[in-house]
Amino acid sequence: MMKSKADEEDYWNSSKFKAFTFDDEDDEFSTLKESKRTVNSIRCLVEEDDDKEEVEKVSWNGEPVSSNSWSVSETAASNQRAEREPAFPKINTVTISKSHSGYSLSSLFKGETDGKVSLTAFSDSSVRLYAPELRKPKSEYKVVSLEKFRSLQDKLLLLDSCVAAHDGNVITAVLIYLKRTLSKEVLFRELEPRQTALSHLIHYLTETRDQRLLLELLRYTCLTCFCFQLLQYKEHLSIADENKRRDFLKSCLSLPFSPEDSSHVQDHYTLMERQVIIETTDRRAERGEKVERALILNMPLITTLSYCCLYHYSESEGTFSSPLNIRQTFKISEKQFFVTALGARAKLKAWSDVDALFTSRNWLGFTRKKSPLGFQRVVDILQKNSAPTQVLQDYVALVDDAELRITLAQKHKCHDIVINTYRDLKDRQQLLGYRGKVERGSGEERKIDELLNNLQIRWKN
Amino acid sequence: MAHSARRDCPELPDFSLLKRLARDRLIYLLEQLPGKKDLFIEADLMSSLDRIANVSTLKQHEVDKLYKVEYRPVVSTSDQLCFLIRPRIQTVKWICDVANADKAVGRLRKYHIIFTPQKFFACEAVLEEQGIFGDVTTDEWSFYLLPLDDDVISLELPEFFRDNFLAGDQRWVRTAGSALHLLHTLYGPFSKVYGIGRFSKMAYESWREQVEEGEQRARQAEIGTVFLIDRDVDYVTPLCSQVVYEGLVDDIFRIKCGCVEFGTEVTSDKSLKVMLNSQDKVFNEIRNEHFSNVFGLLSQKARNLQTAYDKRRGMDIKQMKTFVSDELKGLKQEHRLLSLHISASESIMKKKTQQDFQELLKTEHSLLEGFEIRESICFLEEHIIRQVNMMESLRLLCLLSITENGLLPKDYRSLKAHFLQSYGAEHLLTFSNLRQLGLLVEQPAGETLTVMESRVGKLVNDKTAGKLTGAFSSLAKKSNFRALSRKLNLVPKSDEEYDLRVPRDMAYIFSGAYVPLSCKLVEQVLERDGWTGLEEVTKLLNGQEFAVTGSIGADSSTKSDAQRIVIVVFLGGCTFSEISALRFLGREKGYKFIVVTTAITNSSRLIESLLGNIA
């Protein structure tokens, strides 16, 4: 296997990272192969007394785990402790403004409302102290009542203090209570300026799949960020039936997206509509066929275009499934269309179509092939579709960069191109070297010999 | 590794204690439900549970059958159902369905839910709403920390990243605080805590409160220093292709909970699950190596092994007997591991020698260095047009956006349009997520300054560019990778050769092209004992840095071993490459780093968690 050596080297030389290539021609790869051989041969040597003595370990899922698993040596930690002072300073994270309220937070939680309520009551894990010997029960749950917080001011103060404590669990708990005890209008209004609390409620509603309230909330609070529109649009993903999905997408068209996304959603709908039509027509027509075609429903636009290039290539622009029509409708770029058509026609081994893709571009005389894509990439696409050498060499020959051309030609065994390029480069040494790589007594060998004996060429080496 | 390491690195504390604690606690919880019971385990808890206790331990505590939670009606005939789950509303709803279905047919059973690592009020609210609060008993298995290796501890909470950074839900902040508290209690007291990022600050506060609430017992500190960092401080590093061995294995085969499953392309017969950690002697020697160095090391080991086997020749019976009893088993073990890692390396080679990967790497390096940006954009466009690997396209798009401080509006629109055409219009939602996180954004009109700055930077020499940056930085609002890169020297000078066999800095983990920002910050802060002198850097990172010293322990000689054992906490995940870089830094500077992370991540996991095309 030969890589596009020139390409790589070009890169490695142009930059500093010369020390490393993933090149498999590297000496080290051969050492690796060698070591593999060595190791394998050793395997034969010792196979007689095999490894079965090690009992296979079975994991939870019932699957065997290799036996070099981590053996845990479990030693108890030393446990010398003595009393000492708490020692770490507070850093300012969020300071909540207490000024707008006459309450002091500590009195709210510790005294005035009711002694039983405290922040830690929600997450009792906070009282927990870990020690190695800890095996004590500690799951008696304190029942916490938030019902004491009845005035809006109390509720909001409660919320703000939870937010200031950064415990998402507690924030959500309070939000669930607020959601229950406040009207939507008031809740939404109060959440709007409280971004952290708002995020928690949005996440909670997402998790509980309370889509309706979530949409209402987003519509109210996210006026500038299009969250509401996107969430609405997202719902199409959970609609399995293609006609319903298409209709749902249509209903999304009226949503005020950003101008950019609005056109993407429009395209999405148009594509879906198109796919349903093509799919229905093709399924009907296909009944006679033996090979089943891939489904295109819900596939990306380019996959759909590729499908049409495979099965509807020569259709006139008037039909829905014609590639040209699709190109027109979705304003597909020239390069994109070219790449997709090239791939599809190559897959069908329709080499004349492939050829036409290049020449049709050059209507001034049909002499030279032109491509919106580098020929190196063209070769790559053709080769991935297993194009034969005769086809490949036409395109390899068109690669501009001589080094790259040689690499590709060698890789794809286009001997003529290699030989001609060396001749053009007047590189006698390389040509001589290449002689060893072609078949003995072949036409290529004769050609090389002729060149080497040609006295008219002024070799550079 | 071939470089000279400092000899005075302190020893690591023993973290197996964490496992024992977790196991004891689990057993205690199971004993709270006497009698035979069936246990339902949440799928993504299975691997972690596997590291803590085995099936027989559970059987000893009267667990009859084991099931995976699959959100389907249960077939169990047991009178007691126990559920070991993450505190997720969806799972709790399913349990409610199970209980309600039983009720409907008049079946009486006991239900017990064990939430791990903690229960959430919202989950209990679901029980209440569904009318089965009281029918179900609940408990918490406070299993916060899973040691994946001698120096790596994971919270195994991949959702931390999305919940915190994307959804803005702080439910796991306290969990992180509690995890830290556990470490503090068992291995502290810590004397210095440094950090950067919003959630780091919050986790610090949560931990500090827990320290104050709890009782204090003085002990000899094993770990003295903690560094907390939010994942969003450095997105560049996890978005780069990994080229150290362990990172590559993770990128290609996906290491899950310290265990990898090699498919038939490696093992040739059937797929094999292998634990990857320091107990694997072969792996331990190559895990932190740049891939180009791995072959050499493996073949050296193969030769050594051959020599060791060859010793048999010419042995008499007695010698042979000693050889067989003392050495052979070890040699065979090593032999097996060696051939496994050789096959894995071969498989990696096959994938990575492909043209596409070479080009990806080249583009990536261009982006990091900030040259040939136009060519990179072109490459990216063709990559998308050809519908090659979507995740790679997204990864490069994000890398481009972060390093260039956003895409030009024209490029952004065109690339986005191409992307939606190639991979599906619903990725509109993915783009919205990425934008929300600042991973993939359009440059706002006012920010052409930074573009100009980088253009100018390319034209003039470094010194002048530095001065210009100084002038501009007061104007630039957002963080700027280029400026950071210059200030911290993240992209080494390009004219020198970089010998990957003898790495001279942490850049070796990216072929000498880039020093990971996250690890560079750790290095700088430890060196300076705080953020002094890094003011410009923290400003570019949007501030939120802190450095605090505890009143205890600060006096107890800063040179003590405990001071040089440093916990680095990654909130939102860290990569194997970062772990390798920290190990390297530790050897160079005489530290021992312990990485505590909410989960192991890499570019694919990071981006997958942000995809918007899931219903």
Image (cartoon, rainbow, N blue to C red):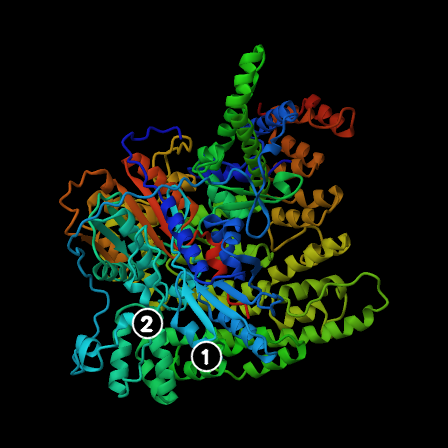
* Left or right for B594, reference B275: left
Is A74 drawn above or below residue B375 in the view shown?
A: above
| x and y, in percent, of residue B179 in the image | 33, 55
Circle 1 or circle 2, nearest the eye: 2
Labels 1 & 2 near each other (Cβ < 8 A): no
Q: Residues within 10 Å of mark 1 (few under 14, many from 20)?
A: many
Image mark 1: chain: A
**Quadrant assignment, res A283:** bottom right
On the rendered image, what quadrant is the N terminus of chain B found in? top left
Image mark 2: chain: A
Viewer-proximal residue, B552 or B571? B552
Q: Label 2 belongs to which residue?
A: A122
Q: Mark 1 and mark 2, same subunit?
A: yes
Q: In this view of the protein, can residue B283 be seen by the observer?
A: yes
Q: Label 1 belongs to which residue?
A: A228
| x and y, in percent, of residue B395 in the image | 48, 55
Regarding mark 2 in the picture, which secondary structure is present there?
Answer: loop
Q: Report the amino acid beneath label 1.
A: Phe
Q: In this view of the protein, can residue A13 be seen by the observer?
A: no
**Sequence order check, earlier mark of 1 and 2:** 2
Viewer-proximal residue, A227 or A59? A59
Q: Report the amino acid beneath label 2.
A: Phe
